[in-house]
Amino acid sequence: MHRILYGKHHIEYKGHIYIVKQPSLELKYRAQLLYDKMVSSNRFEQWISEKQAKLLLIQVGILSPVYENDLKILNDSLENRKLELYQNFTDTKKCNQVRGFIRQIENSIADLSNTVHSLQHFTLKGYANLCMQEFILMNSICDVEDNLVCGMDDSYLNYSLLTSVLIHSYITEGSYRAVGRDNQWRTYWRGTNKNPFGNTEYLTVEQQRLAYYTQLYDNIYQNQDCPPSEVIEDDDMLDGWMIHEHRKDEEGKKQNRAEQLAQKHGNAQEIFVMANNQEDRKVIDDLNDTRGKVIKKQRHAKIASTTGNLQELDLPDRRADLNMQKQQMMSQTVKNMKGK
């Protein structure tokens, strides 16, 4: 908390104390100018494109040709597992099992992402980005007298120092969240009217991230369906709760759209809506309830397996409705006969 408020931190390397500052807006702008210059001056060199880098990984068998779909499946699975964790938060044994699955999925996502970007430094933009990040880092390291280390004795500047700085500079998402819900921090946050960083010209990246998570917890605590404290203090469970709330909200919006559409068409049993593209098609398809989606699937299967003409009464749902009507008529006939 204090490091983020301070905007810089100290590290010790080989007996020397270094101060690592958060980059200013000026430094970021100078770094962007360097990036643009590197791209412009090296554009005729032998670089591979990002697309070529991924194709090369696919050709040598390191990356799956359907890696984008694999990544989507992994992210969807991660959401579902976190939702499952929240829904079973009172079952310790089940939670431990689900949490194990969550860690496995997260590792798989990280491995796949690292593989996809493993040749990034062979692309022009990847190389320029590395130069920009190194420029920012080398102009952010100072000695205890606030002098930039850049340009001093080369023994002070080597790969090991930069690696050490990077390791100590990284704040995990879990740490941001822990500070964001910490009582001491939240008291300070409220006491400064949600402006704890003072009248600075800009917020550092770390300060922006902390402010984001603090506001997130503000919204959660103010929610009328605020989850219990054991859920709030567990990042995975809280993610599951937010996924649950988001899906519930989306389901409500979808239901409202469907009702508004139905009102425009009176008592119509079916409404056909034209889609302009695949994205619109998905939105329209989601307006169907579970029964509607099952009927669509059955109809598509019947159409695909039928050669020649297909009558409406041959559709599975129509035939089921007809059979039900026949059974109701027969039942009513039997009741009438018994009554006589």
Image (cartoon, helix red, strand yellow):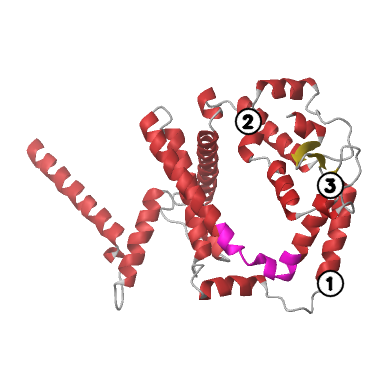
First along the sequence among labels 3 and 2 = 3
Q: In this view, does 229 lie to the left or right of 217?
A: left
Residue 178: mark: 2
Kindly identify which residue carries mark 3. 140
Within the image, what quadrant is residue 57 found in?
bottom right
Kindly identify which residue carries mark 1. 40
Q: Main secondary structure of the magenta part?
A: helix
Residue type beneath disc 2:
Ala
The answer to whether residue 177 is seen in the rendering is yes
Is residue 82 a member of the stretch shown in magenta?
no
Front residue of 98/245: it is 98
> Mark 1–mark 3 contact, CB under 8 Å?
no
Q: Quadrant of the C terminus?
A: top left
The answer to whether residue 340 is seen in the rendering is no
Q: Is mark 2 on a helix, strand or loop?
A: helix
Q: Is residue 242 left or right of residue 121?
A: left
